[in-house]
Amino acid sequence: MKNVMILTGAGQIGMAIARRMGYGMKIVIGDKKPENAQTISTILNQAGFDTVAMEMDLSSRSSIQSILAEAQKYGPVTMLVNAAGVSPSQAPVEAILQVDLYGTAVLLEEVGKIIAPGGVGVTISSQSGHRMKQLTPKEDEQLACTPAEELLSLPLLQPKNIRDTLHAYQLAKRCNEKRVMAEAVKWGERGARINSISPGIIVTPLALDEFRGPRGDFYKNMFAKCPAGRPGTADEVANVAELLMSGKGAFITGADFLIDGGATASYFYGPLKPKG
């Protein structure tokens, strides 16, 4: 038996975190596209890790329960890395809410039921959640505490109240951060911790899709005018995850870490500030 890491979302950020934290563990990799999970699994196995690939649909509770049941066959689940999701250029509003918002809420809830004492999780959110207009305290509480199966019935998540896919994505990521706060209380009862990381522009295949998409110039302008003057790398996100998931982060739970080269700062107080 080994301690088990569950990695959802077979992408560059998830793989970078798994490489940093998953040595000596069994890593169960879930992705909606089984071939993507298998590709990352093969890369990691050939680098000396012990991984297995599975198909997993983040928008399905039964699919999430299946991967958790499989993971527990190998040993106690002590780490969760949730890097699954879809971006504004990849999916319509409904899919973004179903996967990024509802799916993440269900995953945190289900893992929270079985995470081992001393366990820790990180979920990848986004700077987008920091740029949208502030919600009311009541709306924030609704996003944090509404039972997952009722989330998509909330008034602020109805299609008539959502402008476009970017707005849906921002709402989903704001919800992720609030769910992490609420779940941290529940995870704490098991002696476990959960945090979120909100990356800015990180060079991954998903980001390259965005650069080529309808908002490509917007994103290129964003990293050109942020204080760092460049996009980030998946390994820089893994640096933050390493702090949060190691003993050095033992007093950190229910928190969100913005790692965006200062793009959000520039959006509010610098050259990226919207005009008018």
Image: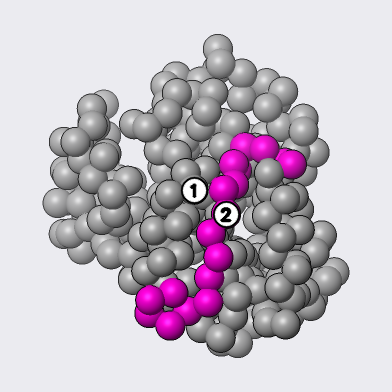
Question: Badge 1 local density, few (<14 within 10 Å), some, or many (20+)?
Answer: some
Query: Is residue 181 visible in the rendered structure shown here?
Result: yes
SS class, disc 1:
helix
Residue flagged by tag 1: what amino acid is it? Pro
**Span shown in magenta:** 45-62
For image coordinates 85% across by 69% down, the residue present is 189
Marks 2 and 1 close (CB-CB < 8 Å) = yes
The image position of residue 229, as x and y in percent, is 16, 59
Residue flagged by tag 2: what amino acid is it? Met
Query: Is residue 238 visible in the rendered structure shown here?
Result: no
Quadrant of the rendered image containing residue 250: bottom right
Q: Which mark is residue 222?
A: none
Relative depth, front residue between 192 and 22: 22
Scheme by which the image is coloured: one colour
Residue 271 vertical position relative to residue 45 in the rendered view, above or below: above
Residue 25 vertical position relative to residue 227 in the rendered view, above or below: below
Disc 2 marks which residue?
54
Relative depth, front residue between 157 and 99: 99
Disc 1 marks which residue?
34
The image position of residue 22, as x and y in percent, is 52, 78
